[in-house]
Image (cartoon, rainbow, N blue to C red):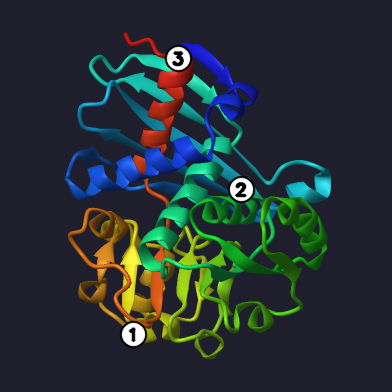
Amino acid sequence: MKLIGEEDLRARVAEDEALAAVEKAFRALTGGAVVQPPPFGMDLEEVRGEVHVKGAYLTGEPIFAIKVASGFYANAEKGLPTGSGLVLVFCSSTGVPLGLLQDNGYLTELRTGAAGALAVRLLTPARPLVAAVLGAGSQARYQIRAIGRIRELTEVRVWSPDPREIEPYLNEISPSLPGSVLGTFSVEEAVRGADVVVTVTPARRPILELPWLGEGATVVAVGSDGPEKQELSTEILRAAGKVVVDSKAQCVRLGETHHAISDGVMSADEIHAELGEVLAGARPGREADELIVCDLTGVGAQDAAIAGVAWNLLGGSSA
């Protein structure tokens, strides 16, 4: 097996490659060209840790991939990154292990940010936007940088459940965006009047409420990637003109859609579309001044697609 480290991956795989990979993944999902098992998750509550295993095979590709990503939220107090992980690459014709991408969670961060940017491109008006970001951790950085590549952001407002995170976030993100980047004291202050709201926290009870959102807002919900996590009041999904998901099969079991269905405020049949269907033009995206929720729980096809990009750039061999 070939070992490829984080430094090499960061040098060769970035936002543009990630967005292309994510688009490829969602087109393949919509076209039925993906073998993708349900994700596996494990919580280590005593240490505030979680582990996610996802993988897929994109039909016709020379490799398939299995990704393990972790989030240990007490790590910051120990001076360690909260996220880590690795990706295993296999030959799709022989099953032989080809490589280990020791990315420490980088590829997961990158593809998740790209999925958020794709959702914004497909579901928001094609004009400059005011954005709100709930969360100021690592993925909140990837989200806003990726979104800033496909939409002009005139203002970004940031709130975090840990106020200590806000100043470092502002210092890092402000130089990379043309508009102002502001810290806020409350979720309501951050989201009122925002065109797009990105939620990127590990919350297990709702932090975002319907009355704070404008009629034409787009909510990109990223943090709720497990059945116990929840960032949005289910009333938001009840009121939405459209609920778009990355995977219907997955989002009825976890994520914001799962909670809305469990609370009886919507049914699985009321999901407007998968993101890949909007990308392919099979279902409409934004059509009017409507509230849209995009529930992104993260799918294995994204991991396989970006692993394929990384392998082509840095590995290249097959069994």
Q: Quadrant of the C terminus?
A: top left
Q: Nearer the viewer, residue 299 or 129?
A: 129
User: What residue do we see at 28% from left, 20% from top?
Assistant: 62
Q: Secondary structure at mark 3?
A: loop
Q: Are marks 2 and 3 in contact (CB under 8 Å)?
A: no
Q: Which residue is mark 1?
A: 265
Task: Give the residue type that dot 2 points to.
Answer: Gly
User: Is 45 left, or right, of 302 in this rendering?
Assistant: right
Q: CA distance from mark 2 to mark 3?
A: 27 Å
- How would you rate the neighbour count of disc 2 (Cα within 10 Å): few for under 14, some for 14-19, many for 20 or more? many
Q: CA distance from mark 3 to mark 1?
A: 48 Å
- How would you rate the neighbour count of disc 1 (Cα within 10 Å): few for under 14, some for 14-19, many for 20 or more? some
- 96 is higher (above) or lower (below) than 295: above
Closer to the N terminus: mark 2 or mark 3?
2
User: Is 34 left, or right, of 86 in this rendering?
Assistant: left
- 55 is higher (above) or lower (below) than 2: below
Q: Which residue is mark 3?
A: 315
Task: Give the residue type that dot 3 points to.
Answer: Gly
Q: Are marks 1 and 2 in contact (CB under 8 Å)?
A: no
Q: Secondary structure at mark 2?
A: strand
User: What residue do we see at 80% from left, 55% from top?
Assistant: 171
Closer to the N terminus: mark 3 or mark 1?
1
Task: Give the residue type that dot 1 points to.
Answer: Val
User: What residue do we see at 47% from left, 68% from top?
Assistant: 127
Which mark identifies residue 249?
A: none
The percent coordinates of residue 302 (x first, y second) are: 38, 42
The percent coordinates of residue 194 (x first, y second) are: 56, 77
Which mark identifies residue 71?
A: 2
